[in-house]
Every structure is written in C-alpha cells, then in structure tokens.
Amino acid sequence: MIGLAGCSGGPEPPRSTGPYDAAADVSFGPAEGPEQAAVDPADPLRVTATSEESRITDVTAVDAAGRTVTGELTADGGAWTSTTPLAAGIEYTVEVATENRDGHPGRRTHVFTTKDADSTALEITFGPEAGTYGVGQPVIAELSEEVESREARAVVERLLTVESEPATEGTWHWADGATMHYRPAEYWPANATVRVSSELAGVHVQDGLRGAESEPLTIRTGDRVEAIADIGTLTMTVTSNGEVVRTMPMTTGKEGFRTREGKKVILGKEQHVRMNGSSIGIAQGSSEYYDLDVYWAARLTWSGEYVHGAPWSVGSHGAQNVSHGCTGLSTENARWFFEFAKVGDIVEHVNGYGNDMDLFGNGFGDWNMSWDDWRQGSALHGDAEAKPEPGDSGRLRPSL
C-alpha cells in the first residue's frame, strides 16, 4: 500500500514567518541610538545597510504631525537618503524593511528628534481673506523674509498646498523674493472651493531661516463674471458664465491718459471716492485738473484706475474717450456694475492705445501672462529663476 505524503516536513518558504529584528543590519547615521542628542535638521536622514547579509527594501519616515519624508533608495539596497528637509524640534519615526540573502524579511523601527530651530522664522500670510471672490482672484503668499535662491524657493513651494474643488491645474509664480502668486492655467472654476495650507513649520529653508506656522486659508468663487471693455467701440459688455448680461456705452482714457490694455482683477469696491488731479501729477490751475466726488467705483489698479460713475461725461459715452484713465459709465450703469460684480472678477480692456497692464505691483495683471511663461516663475516647474517685472507699488492715487 502506498502511503500519503503529509504537508509538513519541508522547509518553510522565506516569507511564511514573521520579520526578523533587523537592528544589527541598519544604522541611521547622526540619528542613531536612543541616547543620541537631538540631530541637526539641516543634515539629511541617511539609513545604511551595515551587514553584507541583508539589503534595505523600503524606508518610511514620518514626523509627529504625520508628514512623510521622501527619499531615494540606492539600486543595491545599500542606503536610503532623505530628499526633503527635516523640520526643527520634531520627533520622527522611521520604519525600515530589509531582506536577507535567504529572502527573509526584516524590520527595524527607530525614533529620533531634531534640534530646535536657532534661526529666523519665515512666516507666510495667505490672501485674500476668507470669503467669496471672482474667478480671477489669485492666491497670494506674503513672506516675512526674502527667499532668493532657486533651491530655497523650491523648498517653500513643495510644502505649500493649494487644492480646489472642482480640481484644476495651477502653480505658484514668484513676483519677487517675498511675494508669491498662485493661479490656474485658466480662471478658477465657477462656484469652487479653494484651500491653501503650509507644512513649512520648522523646515530649513536657507541659512538662518526656518519655516514658521501659517494660518490656512479657504476661499470660494462665485459665478464667472467678465467685463470686456472694447475701446474700439466704446462699449463694455458684461457676461456671467458665458451669457451676456448687459452692454453699456463707456468712455476711457483720452490722449495722454490712455487706459491700460489687458486683463485686470477688481481689487475692491468703494461707493464713494474723492478724486483729484494732483494724485496723478496734474497741477492745480491746469485745464486738466479735477476735484470731484465719484460714486460706484470698482478699483482696477492701486494707482487709481477704476470703473465708476461719470455723469459729467455721459454725452461722450459710446462716442469718444474723455477720461484721465478710468472707465466712465452713467450713474445707473455704474451702480448696476458695482452691485453685480465681485472683488476678483475680471475687467479686460481691448482694442485701445494704452500701455499694457503691469503684471505685478499695480494690481493683479497675472492673467496677461501665458501659462507657459507663468510656469517659468515657479522654482519647481520653471527652467530658470523667476524674473519679476517691475511694477508701480503706489497706493490710493485715483485717476478720473
């Protein structure tokens, strides 16, 4: 009679047992040892295989806040090195997976702490303030300190998160060393939610500078409202979600005071503004001088360009340009636009004769830059350092 072979008696496959303790097979460089003093967060975390009998197969490192440290593992499994900066004054937990020559898996868990920061805190303030805006509103990050090198800027960008629902592609652009703007390739989706946050706290940015805690920001967009101010026909056409809502006769800047060409974002709304010619360099006594109470004004530039009510020139609306740079409407039309439009909505002047809208410094000219050029201003996506355009940073100088 032939006996039946049993299931036992042969060697177990390498992974049928639990992982062995790999404490003797890996080391953590300066972060090694439970008695080790806190390590310098400027140094990368390096995990090394110390035994010829095993290799590293995976490393997971997270801080106390749950943030993951990314890294690169050599092809032979001999070493893993972190590629994102460590934060200061933070506890990290590292899980290392190994494999010996027989294929048995090993595990080692190690905890270490980084030194407290001994440097200036980089604070970031996000804007605008929470609320509902037009689809042209960029997100702004104001930094408390200058960040100049491409490498340092990349550290900042990597740890700032902008998410929108519905999702849309976007990126940061460095307007200067302490100001970043974020916008999508196109305008934000209508009726979207945009959330902005930072994970820079404690992270080494550059010599003497570490990230600080930043307040997150949530804003929302409303309907997609755009106003096309056609200087060729002297009409302003307002659309909402692609549908024409109203077309109005207008006047814009005359010779010597031409209205800027291009896309502008409504910066604010003022029911009443006192405007006078001295704010734009027109001396009292000049035939061009003015001093007027202006109503229903939507600001387009910091230097004083508005869409506003201009009842004194209503006879020229739709016929000729007579203003000192602003877009003049009848009182009725200006009030309607003031109440219909939101901060963050787009006003675009086309077919005119003025200079192009500044990209930065005199309002938000962000949308006048192509998407490819916009990406060039990112330390992560561009091919070169951002080259800020000079802009007028003046404030409260209304034209008429």
Image: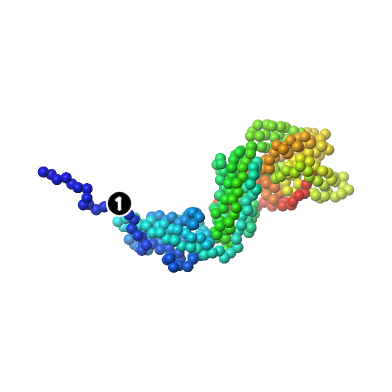
Q: Is 129 left or right of 110, judged from the image as shown? A: right
Residue farthest to the left? 1
Residue 25 in percent (x, y) is at 36, 62
Q: Secondary structure at mark 1?
A: loop
Residue 92 in percent (x, y) is at 47, 59
Tag 1: residue type? Answer: Ser
In the picture, which quadrant includes the N terminus?
Answer: top left
| Mark 1 neighbour class, 10 Å CA radius: few under 14, some 14 to 19, many 20 or more | few
From what the image shows, is residue 187 above or below residue 28?
A: above
Question: Residue at point 75% right, 37% down?
Answer: 335
**Is residue 106 or residue 350 the one in the foreground?**
106
Q: Which residue is mark 1?
A: 16
Residue 51 in percent (x, y) is at 35, 63
**Is residue 116 or residue 242 the one in the foreground?**
116
Q: Is residue 129 visible?
A: yes
Question: Residue at point 65% right, 42% down?
Answer: 133
From what the image shows, is residue 373 above or below residue 100?
A: above
| Quadrant in which residue 102 is drawn | bottom left
Q: Is 254 left or right of 21, judged from the image as shown? A: right
**Is residue 348 or residue 309 the one in the foreground?**
309
Q: Is residue 382 visible?
A: no
Residue 109 in percent (x, y) is at 40, 59
In the picture, which quadrant includes the C terminus?
Answer: top right
Question: Residue at point 67% right, 37% down?
Answer: 226
